[in-house]
Image (cartoon, helix red, strand yellow):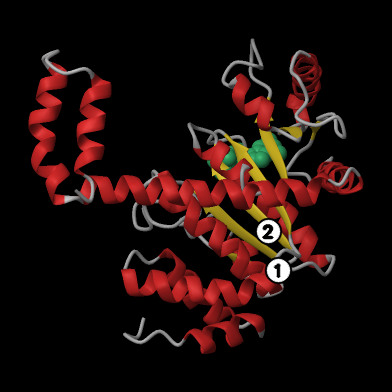
Amino acid sequence: MPREVDVAGLVKGVLAGSRAVLARAITLVESHRTDHREAAQQMLMELLPHAGGGRRVGISGVPGVGKSTFIEALGTRLTAAGHRVAVLAVDPSSTRTMGSILGDKTRMARLASDDGAFVRPSPSAGTLGGVARATRETIVLMEAAGYDVVLVETVGVGQSEVAVAAMVDTFLLLTIARTGDSLQGIKKGILELADVVAVNKADGPHEADARAAARELRGALRMLTPSTAAWTTPVLTCSAQTGAGMDEVWTAVLDHRAALEAAGELERRRADQQVEWMWRVVRDRLLDRLQSDPGVRAALPEVERAVRDGELTPTLAAQQLLDRLGG
Ligand code: GDP
């Protein structure tokens, strides 16, 4: 990255759909340097009016359910149908060198070399907040560059699903039939986020198990309150390997978005997400400032010790730390 960032050049290149410039623009939004952060925000302000045209779909599932096989199969179908497909990932536990969920060259090799697709690994390890921010901003870049389908992959562990659900229109949960209890391993909270559920690996000898698991999941979903009256989460079966049921899964994703749109909820959902994102950044920045404040840092060991030893209530201690900020 040159010292002086050529914001106008980046904006022009992204709008022209240049892959090389797009890659540089993404590197800029992922940068932690203060001058890069400022240039990135300038660039995003100029690109924002050109964004918003993508179908944003989150795809989640525990390792091994077949996410990369599924995304490769889906992405290839979509590019063959004339779509331009961007694939992003949110995996705060990974680093670029240590096998990020999309960093491994063998994953999605076919899609990665497809002219109609742009596959980008998760930003290198950092806080979930930082990774999520970079991913949201990358969605803006991708849409401005003309990608009309944005698939955001996340591993099915912890808080990253919540972060991804907060940046997409439709959240697709991939799962597989398990011997015994198929619900085992799917947290209720994750099921609540799902707009579409697909039981993958419904092929060969596993097909009957997959159908049974889907029935069971339908039952479990009936117990939950739907997030909107406009939509009931369907549970489908598919095979990313044979392609069976893939079209139906994609149709369900499109139907979900159409239902939101018809109910006037898509715009509201996206607007709410923007405001929620603003507060997320405010919280992250305030915490950053607090934790890097010299006065706070100096006082921290003693305050923590006093809380540990029961000499200070946590609430009073928090107040003392906050009082020091900027004081
Ligand atoms: P990820 O960790 O969720 O990305 O899962 P992968 O896509 O890497 O798949 C894990 C394993 O499951 C691989 O060996 C795949 O070949 C296999 N797999 C993925 N999808 C299917 C499917 O639809 N049917 C079958 N039988 N195997 C699959």
Please state which amino acid type lies under the numbered disc 1: Tyr
Quadrant in which the N terminus appears: bottom left
Q: Residue 150's mark?
A: 2
Residue 174 shown left or right of residue 320 in the figure: right
Viewer-side residue, 251 vs 202: 251
Cβ of disc 1 within 8 Å of ligand 1?
no
Viewer-side residue, 48 vs 209: 48
Please state which amino acid type lies under the numbered disc 2: Val
**Image vertical order of residue 84 relative to residue 322, above or below:** below
Quarter-of-image position of residue 81: bottom right
Q: Residue at x 72, y 58 (%)?
A: 75
In the image, farthest residue toward the top = 180
Which residue has dot 1 on it? 147
Residue 54 shown left or right of residue 231 in the figure: left
**Image vertical order of residue 147 relative to residue 304, above or below:** below
Q: Position of residue 155 (x, y in %)?
A: 53, 39
Regarding residue 42, the answer to whether it shows in the image is yes
Q: Where is residue 193 in the image (x, y as percent from the top left)?
A: 67, 32
The answer to the question of whether label 1 and label 2 lie on touching residues, with beta carbons closer than 8 A, is yes
**Image vertical order of residue 159 relative to residue 23, above or below:** above
Q: Where is residue 241 in the image (x, y as percent from the top left)?
A: 72, 44
Regarding residue 126, the answer to whether it shows in the image is no
The kind of secondary structure element at disc 2 is strand
